[in-house]
Image (cartoon, helix red, strand yellow):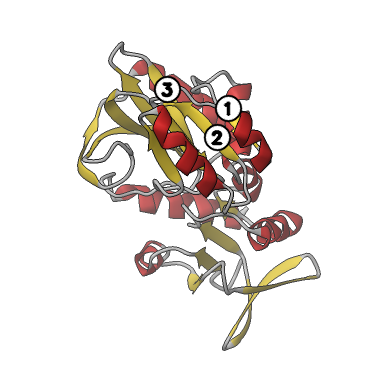
Amino acid sequence: MDAQPTVVIVNGEREWADVFPDAQVRHCRLQTAQWQVAGQTLYLLHEQGRTRVDGLLWRVGAIRPDPRHRVVLDLIRLTRTPCVNPAATLQRGFDRLSMRAEMQAIGLPLLPQEIILGSTLLDHTEPTPPAVLKIGNYHAGYGKALITARSDWPDLRDLTWTADDYVTLEPFVDYVRDLRCLAVGNDLWAMKRRSESWKANRDTQEYSLTDPPAELAEYTRAAMAHLGADILGLDFLEDREGRFFLLETNDVPGLTGFPTSIRHTLARRLMEQISR
């Protein structure tokens, strides 16, 4: 490729441009960007005109997916435009339920869940406290409530009617450690985090890198291979009996607290894909 390729950073911070010195970098927001496919090529439309997209760094994380989200991923796949993570990988983790199905398929340790679609069925549900209610596909601690007593349930059940979405109920884990395992290619890190809230991944007060337990390293590598991911974060809780449970996978994980070299590694992987 003679001219510098154009890399589009979707919903990423401005600092990402610094790790692409050999590319023309464009930033866009998924929520407002306009796209075009012509001649099997993907274009981004913006105020200055139309830009051919040679590769994308996808940083759309922790938002509730909508139809536009999936359409753009389909356009990336149809044009075979290099993307980190690959669009096919991002689609497989598009929703909490699809993510759960993928991890269940490879035997990762998930908490048992009751999944309800249809508000009338909630009248026939009686969770055993302590339990966690999760509404729909929200992340980062949103759309979740702790049920500590049976008397909590009627009011929480009534609130779910306003969401018009599926809900899940799962046991509350009285955890001793919250661990995120992060893999980029063949490299692997683990971070232990402490929160002041019962929500392990919300309002983090302290975090530090640690050696990944062998069990979790194996799970993380298995998930990477299964999804064909460039980067993947897996969030685990360890209970007082030393058992690990997977809370969720993150195909667009936050990088705060991890080595800054990870950004350069991801940029290098994308540029290698573009040059093929």
Picture residue at 46% right of the left edge, 35% below the top:
153
**x and y percent of residue 42 in the render?**
70, 68
Residue picked out by circle 1: 114
Q: Quadrant of the N terminus?
A: bottom right
Q: CA distance from mark 1 to mark 3?
A: 16 Å
Residue picked out by circle 2: 168
Label 1 environment density (alpha carbons within 10 Å; few <14, some 14–19, many ≥20): few
Q: Nearer the viewer, mark 2 or mark 3?
A: 2
Is 223 located above or below residue 138 in the figure? Answer: above
Q: Which element is circle 3 on?
A: strand
Depth order, front residue of 93/16: 93
Amino acid type at circle 2 is Thr
The answer to whether residue 231 shows anywhere in this view is no
In this view, the residue farthest toward the bottom is 48
Q: Earlier in the sequence, mark 2 or mark 3?
A: 2
The answer to whether residue 109 shows anywhere in this view is yes
Depth order, front residue of 181/7: 181
Decide: marks 2, 1 in contact (CB < 8 A)?
Answer: yes
Hey, which quadrant is residue 2 in on the image? bottom right
Label 2 environment density (alpha carbons within 10 Å; few <14, some 14–19, many ≥20): some
Picture residue at 45% right of the left edge, 55% below the top:
267
Amino acid type at circle 1 is Glu
Q: Which element is circle 1 on?
A: strand
Residue picked out by circle 3: 245
Is 8 located above or below residue 207 in the figure? Answer: below
Position of 119 with respect to 108 (left or right) is: right
Picture residue at 55% right of the left edge, 39% below the top:
229
Position of 146 with respect to 91 (left or right) is: left
Depth order, front residue of 30/4: 30
Picture residue at 60% right of the left edge, 44% below the top:
95
Q: Earlier in the sequence, mark 2 or mark 1?
A: 1
**x and y percent of residue 109 in the render?**
49, 19
